Image (spheres, rainbow, N blue to C red):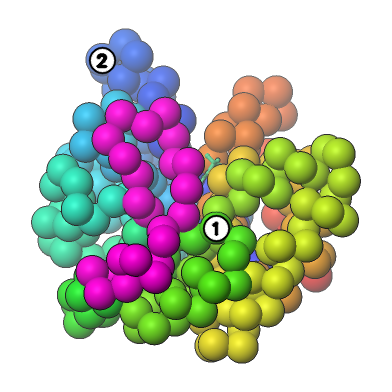
Amino acid sequence: MTKLSVNINKIATLRNSRGGNMPNLVQTAIDCEIFGAQGITIHPRPDERHIKYQDVFDLKKIVKNEYNIEGNPTEGRFQEVVLAVKPEQVTLVPDTLGALTSNAGWDTITHKAKLKELVNIYRSEGIRVSIFVDANPEMVEAAAETGTDRIELYTEAYAKDYTESPEKAISAFVAAAEMAQKVGLGINAGHDLSLENLAYFHKNIPGLLEVSIGHALICDALYYGLENTIQLYLRQLKD
Ligand SMILES: CC(=O)[C@@H](O)[C@H](O)COP(=O)(O)O
Ligand SMILES: NCC(=O)COP(=O)(O)O
């Protein structure tokens, strides 16, 4: 079974645009789970442009299923806050400061020693670790040597290429997933997954445990409503 974790960054973006508490981020997270989401993902960034560090604590009190916090562990208050909150999962992403959004996976060969150290810290606090990687078997293999539990396949390239050729778009991801299975890593995926491209990804990636989806899902919710939209995404993930 593949779990759907709803990324609610965009709800915080909308809230912050007026400085008040509308829409209410905490209530949205509660409702996402009521509507069927099996997890909530957030990605606090050092500039707090959407998720604020206080949100990370507030959400901890209400997320009932899986709480997944993504971000660069070496920037801002990320590490301190994650260790204080102890979510079910932390996803390490090599974001550069000021990037519009996440735009690369880790080079797990170059950064193996640092990642190993970080994985140890989180795992010793009982937090499952996932490392954000491009669809490259070498990077997946080296990720396993850090001791991480899972990888998250960075799916922007898949989403981009899907419209031209789904078969071509998926091939590197299948190879990366097969390597993950070979070296005993769990497989998550995310970035630009959508109602258009999700079912094909799910059908073709062996052992896909979780997808985290925000941007497209929240856009769809403007038209279909949040409850219907979550149901539509869950339908794409049916075995
Ligand atoms: C890690 C990842 O893939 C991103 O999609 C991220 O979680 C989204 O971050 P933004 O909402 O800041 O673009
Ligand atoms: N890890 C990916 C994520 O949480 C959401 O990415 P996107 O759907 O907002 O592109």
Q: Mark 2 sits on what residue?
A: 19
Q: Mark 1 sits on what residue?
A: 134
Quarter of the image that includes the C terminus: bottom right
Looking at the picture, does residue 122 appear above or below residue 202?
below
Q: Secondary structure at mark 1?
A: loop
Looking at the picture, does residue 25 appear above or below residue 84?
above
Alpha-carbon span between mark 1 and mark 2: 36 Å
The amino acid beneath tag 1 is Asp
Label ID, residue 155? none
Region rendered in magenta: 93-115
Classify residue 143 by image quadrant.
Answer: bottom left
190 left or right, relative to 228 = left
Residue under the image location 16 percent in, 64 percent down? 83
Looking at the picture, does residue 177 appear above or below residue 198?
below
Residue 200 lies within the magenta run: no
Can you name the residue that lies furthest to the front here? 110
